[in-house]
């Protein structure tokens, strides 16, 4: 019995109990004629054909895959999601999903406790980090309507795009050779900036931006801080073991925070979240409906969200996961610790291997590195790393799956000045070690790479 089949009895038992609840309202058999297109045999045929299509995926489940931020969700998450989706609750309003709305409020309070917010904060789950950041930037625009929103050149591209959607001015903060935002640039432009987006764990190389210094700067100039922890947010659970510890210790001082449970929270896509320290921002999101918010005077999550319909199953899945893996170092923190250890171990092997170069020490669990070409030209560097990337995907079961990372040539030369510039970009390799299994697989992965 494989790792997924072993959970089928538990799912079957839960479905049987839920069916009994459904049948307590009376059977529906007399209301519809049997539909031959919905027979179990027809559905099984469709599922088997779908299964064949799914085999066309890369092996996201296997530690040989270290390319992008992809891995299967926790068994409790997909089982809970499946169970809840047979009802298909909608967490926009309490009457669309009373139990799952309460579960969502519960997990939001657990996230708030994790980041250091108190019970007066507000927040909700979203369909992903992009929408979570859109809402946070909307609040930023409404708070300082005549001022710009600033983010570093390494911030996720969603911030620039969402500022266009919001018709808000966007300011890009240049970064130095370490990939960190230039504080002097912010000082010189502070009067025009209303909100700074600080990324704790960039999606490129997992860089933790200097929150301590940015908070101090923001306070001097009356600037809001929005934390994009979509990828890195859960690493606060193991902050004491991180080189960036001091920045995680002031996490709670940000005005708003985005964290994606569908990344390191072991949830199915899509499940994001947004938290606000000051509950009064709800006034920017407030609205009414003539047919929606009538079953209760309690808070309906749609009243504090830009989104309307949202899957209640996401809240059920996240809640079930946190029942097994609490938001502490001994719970979900163990998963983050394994990811971090894998990255450190792999980076160390790179540094000890002739012919290979570590681009920078990893802050979290993403490693950037490259094979050193015989001729120190950027075009040769790009060619050899692209060849290594492609070779892994072509090698079958003994292969590997990485990603490529592109760096502006000028920035690359600040760290590696002995390269000849004959193209405007440097292309290096990138590995994301977000699976627990990576900790024990990195040596094998390095061997397959020839490191």
Image: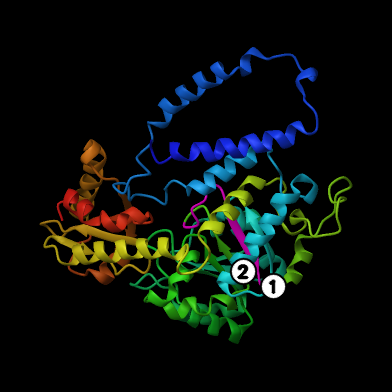
Q: Which mark is residue 54?
A: none
Q: Find numbered disc 2 in the image and state the secondary structure of the residue it sits on.
A: helix
Q: Nearer the viewer, residue 134 or 67?
A: 67
Residue name at image x 77 percent, y 25 percent: 27
Q: Is residue 268 magenta?
A: yes
Q: Is residue 322 magenta?
A: no
Q: Which mark is residue 119?
A: 1
Classify mark 1: residues with Cα within 10 Å, few (<14), some (14-19) or many (20+).
Answer: few
Q: Earlier in the sequence, mark 2 or mark 1?
A: 2
Q: Which mark is residue 112?
A: 2
Residue name at image x 50 percent, y 60 percent: 325
Q: Which residues are magenta?
A: 264-278
- The quadrant of the image that shows the N terminus is top left
Q: Nearer the viewer, residue 422 or 429?
A: 429
Report whether residue 59 is seen. Answer: yes
Residue name at image x 36 percent, y 56 percent: 436
Check whether the beta carbons of the residues at disc 2 and disc 1 lie within 8 A of each other: yes
Report whether residue 167 is seen. Answer: no
- Side of 423 relative to 41 (left or right): left
Residue name at image x 57 percent, y 52 percent: 320
User: Label 2, label 1: how many angstroms apart (C-alpha)?
Assistant: 8 Å
Q: Nearer the viewer, residue 149 or 280?
A: 280
In this view, 263 is above or below 201: above
């Amino acid at each position: 019995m494989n790792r997924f089949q072993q959970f089928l009895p538990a799912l079957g038992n839960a479905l049987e109990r839920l069916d009994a609840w459904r049948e307590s309202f009376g059977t529906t058999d007399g209301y519809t004629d049997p539909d031959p297109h919905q027979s179990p045999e027809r559905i099984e045929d469709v599922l088997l054909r779908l299964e064949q299509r799914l085999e066309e995926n890369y092996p996201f489940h296997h530690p040989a895959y270290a390319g992008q931020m992809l891995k299967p969700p926790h068994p409790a998450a997909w089982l809970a999601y499946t169970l809840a989706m047979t009802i298909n609750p909608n967490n926009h309003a309490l009457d669309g999903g009373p139990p799952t709305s309460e579960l969502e409020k519960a997990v939001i309070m657990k996230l708030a406790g994790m980041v250091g917010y108190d019970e007066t904060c507000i927040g909700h789950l979203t369909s992903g980090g992009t929408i979570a950041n859109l809402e946070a930037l909307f609040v930023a625009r409404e708070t300082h309507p005549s001022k710009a929103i600033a983010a570093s050149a390494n911030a996720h591209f969603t911030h620039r795009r969402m500022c266009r959607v919001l018709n808000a001015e966007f300011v890009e903060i240049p970064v130095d050779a370490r990939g960190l935002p230039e504080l002097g640039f912010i000082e010189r432009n502070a009067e025009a900036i209303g909100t700074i987006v600080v990324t704790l764990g960039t999606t490129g190389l997992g860089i933790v931006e200097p929150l301590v210094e940015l908070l101090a700067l923001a306070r001097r100039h009356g600037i809001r801080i929005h934390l994009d922890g979509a990828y890195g947010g859960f690493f606060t659970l193991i902050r004491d073991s991180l080189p960036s510890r001091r920045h995680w210790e002031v996490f709670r001082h940000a005005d708003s925070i985005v964290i994606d449970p569908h990344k390191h929270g072991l949830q199915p896509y899509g499940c994001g979240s947004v938290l606000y320290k000051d509950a009064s921002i709800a006034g920017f999101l407030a609205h009414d409906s003539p047919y929606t918010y009538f079953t209760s005077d309690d808070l309906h999550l749609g009243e504090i969200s830009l989104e309307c319909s949202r899957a209640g199953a996401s809240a059920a899945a996240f809640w079930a996961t946190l029942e097994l893996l609490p938001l502490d170092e001994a719970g979900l923190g163990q998963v983050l610790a394994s990811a971090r250890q894998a990255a450190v171990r792999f980076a160390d092997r790179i540094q000890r291997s002739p012919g290979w170069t570590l681009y920078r020490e990893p802050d979290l669990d993403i490693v950037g590195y490259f094979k050193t070409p015989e001729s120190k030209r950027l075009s040769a560097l790009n060619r050899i790393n692209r060849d290594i990337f492609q070779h892994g995907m072509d090698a079958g079961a003994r292969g590997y799956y990485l990603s490529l990372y592109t760096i502006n040539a000028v920035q690359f030369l600040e760290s590696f000045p002995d390269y000849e510039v004959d193209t405007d970009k440097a292309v290096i390799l990138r590995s994301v070690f977000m699976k627990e299994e990576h900790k024990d697989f990195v040596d094998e992965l390095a061997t397959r790479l020839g490191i």
